[in-house]
Image (cartoon, rainbow, N blue to C red):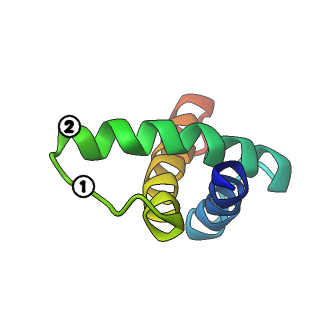
Amino acid sequence: MWIIVSGFAGWLAGKIMKGTGYGIFWNIILGIIGGYLGKIILNALQISTANNNVGILITSVIGAVALIFISGIISGKR
């Protein structure tokens, strides 16, 4: 279930970051990886989310948006 929610988060992050997305497939991959990054970011900020699908979605969207932003800077899209 976590992979499905994270994949949806990647798609959602692609919509949030209009113009810098990498297509649905890569946005889903970024959402899954972003779940890990989001957890790291929120832990560093000492922010806790619920351990349910909504919490996973929020964490994954934050991480995926960060990844899309960083990869956009690296690739010159930002």
Identified at 49% across, 58% down, the residue is 56
Alpha carbon separation for disc pair 1 and 2: 10 Å
Residue 43 location in percent, x, y?
Answer: 24, 40
Residue furthest out toward the left: 46
- Neighbour tally class for label 1: few under 14, some 14-19, many 20 plus, Cα within 10 Å: few
Q: Amino acid at mark 2?
A: Ala
Q: Nearest to the eye among marks 1 and 2: give it.
A: 1
Residue that mark 1 sits on: 48
Answer above or below: position of 45 versus 71. Answer: below
Instruction: Give the side of residue 48 with respect to residue 75, left or right.
Output: left
In terms of depth relative to the viewer, which is nearer, 38 or 65?
38
Residue 60 location in percent, x, y?
Answer: 51, 53
Answer above or below: position of 46 versus 16. Answer: above
- Neighbour tally class for label 2: few under 14, some 14-19, many 20 plus, Cα within 10 Å: few
Q: Amino acid at mark 1?
A: Ser
Residue 48 location in percent, x, y?
Answer: 24, 55
Report the label total: 2
In terms of depth relative to the viewer, which is nearer, 9 or 15?
9
Residue 62 location in percent, x, y?
Answer: 43, 55
Residue that mark 2 sits on: 44
Answer above or below: position of 43 versus 47. Answer: above
Q: Quadrant of the N terminus?
A: bottom right
Residue 29 shows which numbered tag? none
Element type at marker 2? helix
Identified at 31% across, 60% down, the residue is 49
Identified at 46% across, 47% down, the residue is 63
